[in-house]
Image: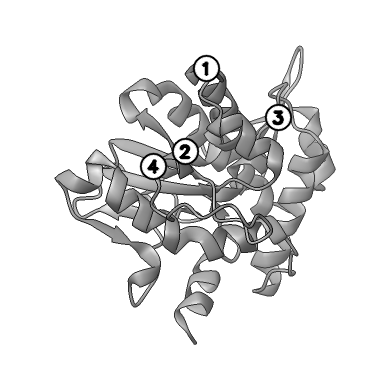
Amino acid sequence: MDKNEVWMEKRCGRITASELGQLVSASGKVIDSNVSYVRAKRFERRHGFSLPVSARAMDIGNETEPDIFRWAVGNLPECKAARFVYSKDLPEVPFWIPEGMPMFGASPDAYSEDDSVVLEFKTMVGNETVEFFCDERTSGEEKSFRVFKDHGPQILGLFLSNPKVKSVVLVKYAPVRDDIMKDLDSLLAPWRGVVFRFRREDYAESIEDMRRRVLLFDAFIDSDMNPSKMKEGWELVDGRLVKVEKEKKSVTG
């Protein structure tokens, strides 16, 4: 197997940081998309493979990652202060699995040699996205709010995957557009990257909440329960799924 196949095999059946957005909802309740995710992961665990998903945006991101890493090395102070590793340059793509959570993991796009800083790369896709993030008149608060809304679960997952990680630096990058003849600026032009920094100490409670969410969903994936029943309200108590009711709780194996 090539290294991408090895990486995909490690991910198969596991909840991953990049998928954590599928475990949450704005209301905090279990919704249809959460149930669909449980069905997909259950399929992977029971059959040993995942069904293909077509996502052009993901393909564009993968194609642009080497350029973003070069941009980061040329522009980020973190990369000037320490040596960083680009995961896809390694013989085997890293997949961090935290202690006590064997069915969860994450692959950093790049990271410092001591694992303390992770770089996460996001390619700007679509005119509106580029215009929003590259507009100097858009406030930093607006940009940060949108980034955490879109990528917050993954950021928490990166912290969750490795206790050594102290900060996550997310780069939103505007790639060269082949359909715009006047886009002649260097791939390393400072304007192409918008940087957001997240510190573990600022998200300790959210990381713990996400850990509990992952363990709850992992239990559902392994159970024989109809995933639709997740909407009825459950919690994990001593490794068992407990249905939360107004006046009483019933315990299932």
Separation of marks 3 and 2 at Cα, in angstroms: 16 Å
Which dot, 1 or 2, sits closer to the camera? Answer: 1
Closer to the camera, 22 or 144?
144
Q: What label does residue 25 carry, if any?
A: 3
Against 83, is 10 above or below? below
Quadrant in which the C terminus appears: top right
Q: Are marks 2 and 4 in contact (CB under 8 Å)?
A: no
Q: Is residue 229 left or right of residue 144?
A: right
First-in-chain label (1 vs 2)? 1
Q: Which residue is mark 1?
A: 139
What residue sits 50% from the left and 68% below the top? Answer: 10
Q: Secondary structure at mark 1?
A: loop
Q: Position of residue 60 (x, y in %)?
A: 62, 60
Residue that mark 4 sits on:
190
Classed neighbour count for the residue bearing mark 3: other residues with Cα under 10 Å, few (<14), some (14–19), many (≥20): few
Give the quadrant of residue 8: bottom right
> Which residue is under mark 2?
155
Earlier residue among tags 4 and 1: 1
